[in-house]
Image: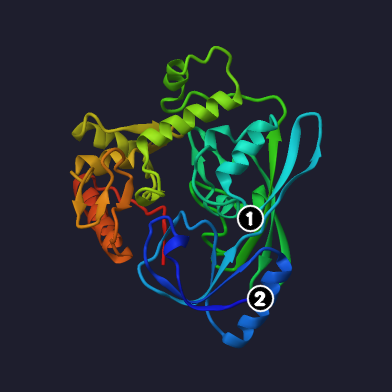
Amino acid sequence: MEILKNFSLLKYNTFGIDASAKYFSAFNSMAQLHELLEYNDQLHEPLLILGGGSNLLLTKDVEGLVLKNEIPGKHLQREDDTYYYINAGAGENWHRFVLYCIANNMAGVENLSLIPGNIGACPMQNIGAYGVELSDVFYELTAFHLQEKKLVTFNVKECSFGYRESVFKTIYKNQFAILNVTFRLLKQPRFNTGYGAIQQELQRMNVTELNINAISQAVVNIRSSKLPDPAQVGNAGSFFKNPEVPASIFLALKEKFKDIIGYALTNTQVKLAAGWMIEQCGWKGYRRRDAGCHATQALVLVNYGSASGREIYDLSEEILESVKNKFGVTLEREVNII
């Protein structure tokens, strides 16, 4: 066990923010995590469990102990006539896991290709894209309670998944470290190509026989064309959630803004396109020093080099205020702020 002091987190967050942790260590097993927690009982420092750092904005140095979750491994737990049940360690990279599933003809995660981050953060955030959410393929997870130092298993109901939400972001925030996740994947795929530009991209790719690999590649192509690579430009993907409003509010907005984009969720609820509203407020492509709003996707805030987390946060505040003033809609951040 090695505890590092005043450790730079520059390479551990996809925004590329040069903040530091008072103390830092990593664990690749429950036993190592338990040992680190026992040590911290003497330090009495606040804890931050770090995964891939792809949904995080550091606005200051972290005054506490940062523990990076590096639990590896993936294996088939069992199967039945319909499903494969595959377990993956929280430290596994999400996209590499998706590719592994596709290579083994395990269907259900192909629409979630190229989402940055690690396995452990996926249920916390209930990641989603192109008509699929993690909750659609989730079976259960095992987590370790940081204070009580005990294992707890959560099924899909107990996770209380919502739009980019789970109990790990609400009532259990900062209470658990997720150790591994079990997914329930289909033996016979059910193709989901009705969302976004997937159909058009498949046609452009000249796909004649639909399969999960083709859908994955289409999603990769679309995401690569719209979203900046964190290895090239610091970002955390979509910074804001798409807000959900009553249908009556949407109809009123439609009267005033004829081109406003909305997707019916139910007969009474509509999801608005936050990126469209941000663009209408003039932010798309905006740059102030090294903090900016990406030129092809207004939902993405970026660090062009040496922006501080505070500069990016302040820009997000201005964006929130302008959308509120223009549309009367309050956006929420999807990214976790430290």
For marks 1 and 2, give the CA distance: 19 Å
Q: Is residue 43 above or below residue 138?
A: below
Q: Residues within 10 Å of mark 2 (few under 14, many from 20)?
A: few
Of 49 and 207, nearer the camera is: 207
Q: Quadrant of the C terminus?
A: bottom left
Instruction: Tell me the residue at 56%/42% (across/down).
Output: 95
Q: Of helix, strand and loop, which one carries label 2?
A: loop
Identified by mark 2, the residue type is Met
The quarter of the displayed image where residue 106 is located: top right
Identified by mark 1, the residue type is Ala
Q: Residues within 10 Å of mark 1 (few under 14, many from 20)?
A: many
Instruction: Tell me the residue at 60%/55% (across/down).
Output: 120
Instruction: Tell me the residue at 55%/67% (across/down).
Output: 174
Q: Quadrant of the N terminus?
A: bottom right
Of 310 and 231, nearer the camera is: 231
Q: Of helix, strand and loop, which one carries label 1?
A: loop
In the figure, is residue 138 to the left or right of 291?
A: right
In the figure, is residue 61 to the left or right of 103?
A: left
Q: Is residue 180 above or below residue 246?
A: below
Residue 134 in sight here: no
Give percent across and percent down for residue 322. 20, 51
In the figure, is residue 134 to the left or right of 308?
A: right
Residue 108 in sight here: yes
Give percent across and percent down for residue 27. 64, 67
Residue 1's disc is: 2
Give percent across and percent down for residue 202. 47, 19
Question: In this view, which residue lies farthest toward the top?
Answer: 208
Residue 90's disc is: 1
Judge depth for marks 1 and 2 and give the one in front.
2
In the figure, is residue 177 to the left or right of 224?
A: right
Instruction: Tell me the residue at 48%/14% (across/down).
Output: 206
